[in-house]
Image: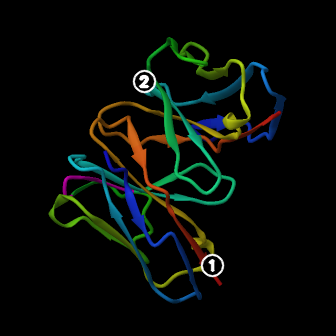
Amino acid sequence: QKEVEQDPGPLSVPEGAIVSLNCTYSNSAFQYFMWYRQYSRKGPELLMYTYSSGNKEDGRFTAQVDKSSKYISLFIRDSQPSDSATYLCASDSGGYQKVTFGIGTKLQVIP
Amino acid sequence: EAGVAQSPRYKIIEKRQSVAFWCNPISGHATLYWYQQILGQGPKLLIQFQNNGVVDDSQLPKDRFSAERLKGVDSTLKIQPAKLEDSAVYLCASSLRGNEQFFGPGTRLTVL
């Protein structure tokens, strides 16, 4: 079992839709949860970073962590064609421990 | 603020040849990471440096891969000899605080 599981998609939605991206993880020691966005032929870019359970909002993006069910979510409101990218969830247990990435979900927002 | 720089951006080599990648992290970032990203997969950590010391190299295939970070700034990753399965994007990242990593554009390696 991979430590961080993510559906690779692809996921296609119309412009303006609410997008829900999800991951599950198995390592109970994970405390930090990140979402990265990766455009084609570019390096990943940190979008959201949360510690432990709860919600965090930044503009059109909301990250949600439920440690009881080991479930990580990213919601994108009013999705735009520029949101078309691969979204990687990632987790680690803090300090300088290794960050474990999911395989990424490819999102396409259709105008 | 300048981002993480990597070179070359693309490299094509034949199997059994050697190749080296270079990374210049964001100024002041003490932690530097090398990742391997195979097509359709997430980045896999190869090695993590804290200044010029190695923190984690548990997933580095040490029989063929080597990395160094002299003077705690720039870093090079070398593969010798390369295998077909080494075809991937090699990403360098740096961080000031462990969880917030900033990635470079990557080097796309094709081994024929």
Q: Residue, x 38% and y 60% (percent of image)?
A: B5
Query: Callout 1: 10 Å neighbours few (<14), some, many (20+)?
Result: few
Mark 1 belongs to which amino acid?
Leu
Name the residue beneath numbered marker 1. Answer: B84
Q: Residue, x 58% and y 30% (percent of image)?
A: A25
- Picture quarter containing residue A108? top right
Q: Nearer the viewer, residue B54 or B104?
A: B104
- Say if residue B63 shows up in the picture: no
Q: Residue furthest left?
A: B71
Query: Callout 2: 10 Å neighbours few (<14), some, many (20+)?
Result: some
Please give the count of numbered marks on the rendered protein. Answer: 2
* Residue A21, horizontal then vertical, whole percent: 69, 27
Is B51 included in the stretch rendered in magenta?
Answer: yes
Helix, strand or loop at disc 1? Answer: helix
- Magenta-drawn stretch, dominant element (helix, strand or loop): strand
Label 1: chain letter: B
What span is colored magenta in the figure? B47-52
Q: Residue, x 40% and y 44% (percent of image)?
A: B102
Name the residue beneath numbered marker 2. Answer: A31
Q: CA distance from mark 2 to mark 1?
A: 36 Å
